[in-house]
Image (spheres, rainbow, N blue to C red):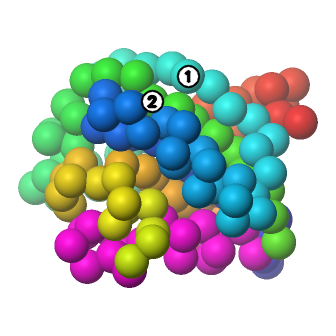
């Protein structure tokens, strides 16, 4: 079932490099409405839980360390076909392979520090959004 919401995080690298405004501009210019947003920081435990699906992968420890090293911006976005359209907007995981004009092509430095997270399915969008936001924080 396709929904009209997805979840994103502006990752620590993009926050550190001052790209919050530029990324939010790309998101809103693409027709997404921000229905929840917060500036926060993941603890090591939060990052371990959020990325538990990758716990057996060789990059898991580095991912947890990276995602907990500094502030992030978490947001729930709304638009028709939100998950698929947002995945197209952010581009390939590796910014070197991302299409011109995508968020990762513009703001990411490498495959490990790739500026933004975007949910890969409607189900994960709901799970990830609920991880970061209570119902009263979503408008």
Q: Secondary structure at mark 1?
A: strand
Give the residue displayed 45% in from the left and 69% down from the top: 102
Q: Quadrant of residue 137?
A: top right
Of callouts 1 and 2, the N-terminal one: 1
Question: Which x, y percent locates residue 92?
Answer: 36, 74
Give the residue displayed 55% in from the left and 60% down from the top: 119
Give the residue displayed 70% in from the left and 59% down from the top: 29
Residue 52 shown left or right of residue 121 in the figure: left
Q: Quadrant of the N terminus?
A: bottom right
Q: Answer yes or no: is residue 87 visible.
A: no
Question: What is the C-alpha distance between the residues marked 1 and 2?
Answer: 6 Å
State the mark number for residue 39: 1
Q: Nearer the viewer, residue 113 or 31?
A: 31
The reply to whether the C-beta atoms of the residues labelled 1 and 2 are less than 8 Å apart is yes
- The residue pinned by badge 2 equals 72
| Residue 20 drawn in magenta | no
Q: Quadrant of residue 132?
A: top right
Eyeballing the image, is 101 above or below 28?
below
Stretch in magenta? 81-99
| Residue 93 drawn in magenta | yes
Q: Secondary structure at mark 2?
A: strand
State the mark number for residue 73: none
């Amino acid at each position: 079932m396709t929904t009209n919401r997805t979840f994103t995080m502006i990752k620590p690298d993009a926050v550190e490099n001052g790209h919050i405004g530029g990324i939010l501009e790309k998101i809103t210019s693409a027709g997404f409405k921000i229905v929840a947003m917060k500036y926060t920081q993941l603890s090591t435990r939060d990052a371990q839980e959020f990325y538990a699906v990758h716990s057996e992968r060789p990059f898991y420890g580095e991912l947890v360390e990276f995602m907990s090293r500094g502030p992030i911006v978490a947001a729930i976005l709304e638009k028709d076909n939100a998950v698929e359209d947002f995945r197209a907007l952010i581009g390939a995981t590796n910014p070197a392979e991302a299409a011109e004009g995508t968020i990762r092509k513009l703001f990411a430095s490498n495959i490990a520090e790739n500026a933004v997270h975007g949910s890969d399915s409607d189900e994960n969008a709901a799970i990830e959004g609920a991880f970061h936001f209570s119902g009263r924080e979503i408008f």
